[in-house]
Image (cartoon, rainbow, N blue to C red):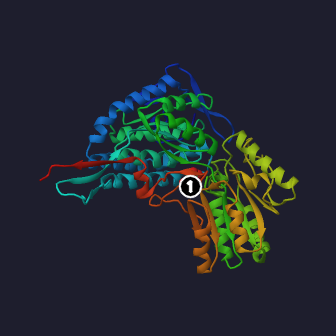
Amino acid sequence: MNLNLTRDELVRSQNFIGGRWCDAGSGALLAVTDPADESLITQVPDSDAIDARAAVDAAHKAFASWRATPAKERARLIKRWNDLIVEHQEDLGRLISREQGKPLAEGRGEVLYAASYVEWFGEEAARAYGDIIPAPVTGRRMMALKEPVGVVAAITPWNFPAAMIARKIAPALAAGCTVVCKPAEDTPLTSLALVRLAEEAGLPAGTLNIVTASRAQTPVVVDAWLADSRVRKITFTGSTPVGKHLARASADTLKKCSLELGGNAPFIVFDDADLDAAVDGLMASKFRNGGQTCVCPNRIYVQSGVHDAFVERLGQRVGALKVGPASHPDSQIGPMINARAVDKIARHVADAVAQGARVVVGGQRVRNAVANGPHYYAPTVLIGATKDMELSCEETFGPVAPVFRFVDEAEVVALANDTPFGLAAYFYTQDIARASRVADALESGIVGVNEGALAAEAAPFGGVKESGYGREGSRYGLEDYLHIKYVCQGGLR
Ligand code: SIN
């Protein structure tokens, strides 16, 4: 395992429960591999229900004192955690890139992106204001107080192994909740390193607990949390089928849920768009993280008048992208996370081509002296995409940009909304009336107008329809970890 870190002890290979690093009770292990070549990086615990319950025991025990800790002190510890994350940007960036596969520049960028949420919620901790409500009768004081919901179970994905954990755990801690966390089986090392830094920042024992588990053991761990009435909230980023399962299964104990689920983002280019800006926006939003992003455009709708010009410019830019491992300084598109991911991309492209789409650039797996592994797929542009193709109905989650031609605004808005999902949507136009009309008409939690990079710590991130509910980031992100207690004090006269 050569990760070239300045601090090797950031690579943890144990769970962290109640302030102690420990193995899974069973001693079982999960292999963590490099997606570039499937080589072994290290092993971490393959936890079970007993480990999962131990984590809740610790979080539950710590809750009483953490919620009673003044917000200013919670904020101090969270901000210290942020400082340590920023200080270790290079090491964390290397860990992200190694286990997740994104180019090192993106790995470094993700660390600062993650830290921005930690800093933001460190500042928001002191702003969980309630209300004094004017009483309808004399002699009463009526108050709406904000309280932490309790123990939070955070289940995080592999595509942004630092940012997703940060934007769940930081608001939970800021609100006064304690946390049990299970990172994705493909990328546990970044999360463990972040927890190590939280420990160093001085978070009290039991406040933040983490257990790792394989794909096979994940349901065992999560079911233990779902069944446990002490866990009062589930926060999850991942697929819609899993999100629906969590919503159903948490109904028995009526947990609060925040579900950030799948998307199928439309990206619309109108005839009156600034084409260069639209191509730049698409490159930024579609090819970030190799297209493995919930908000990345999945369906590119281009109006007839600019279709050919847009495709030509897009094809040139996409054809110039360099594919290779995270460690290679020129890489812009890394390996996909695993064999299932690259198989799905290949299946979507094959289905589209069989139904009449034409490959402008890419369209096949890549394996060569630089991209020397089984998980690489060429950045691809397809034209002639139609709504019956698999890639129109389902997230491809890879570097494939299918272009659909459209004629008028009403048609494209109907096409864009013709999906059960509603996470992000983008469109480019220079007509200001159209900008507000289309933004209103799109059924989506996030809309980019002449902008491809939407997420920020100060902005609410989340979907509508089957893309889930709850918001992360922004002042709304704190509310998701609080409930309202109404206190009515009588006899005041
Ligand atoms: C995601 O893919 O779920 C998150 C993407 C982002 O934060 O931009």
Q: Nearer the viewer, residue 241 or 254?
A: 254
Q: Which residue is nearer to you in this view: 74 or 260?
A: 260
Judge whether 74 appears above or below 267 on screen: above
The quarter of the picture where residue 173 lies is top left
Residue 128 percent coordinates (x, y): 32, 53
Q: Residue at x 52, y 59 (%)?
A: 455
Residue 382 image-quadrant placement? bottom right
* 21 lies above or below 400: above
Image location of residue 251, percent across then percent down: 51, 37
Question: What residue is pinned by disc 1?
Answer: 463
Q: Secondary structure at mark 1?
A: loop
Q: Position of residue 186 (x, y in %)?
A: 60, 37
Q: How many marks?
A: 1
> Where does the image place residue 333, in percent across and percent down from the top left?
67, 53
Amino acid found under the numbered disc labelled 1: Gly
Q: Nearer the viewer, residue 470 or 364?
A: 470
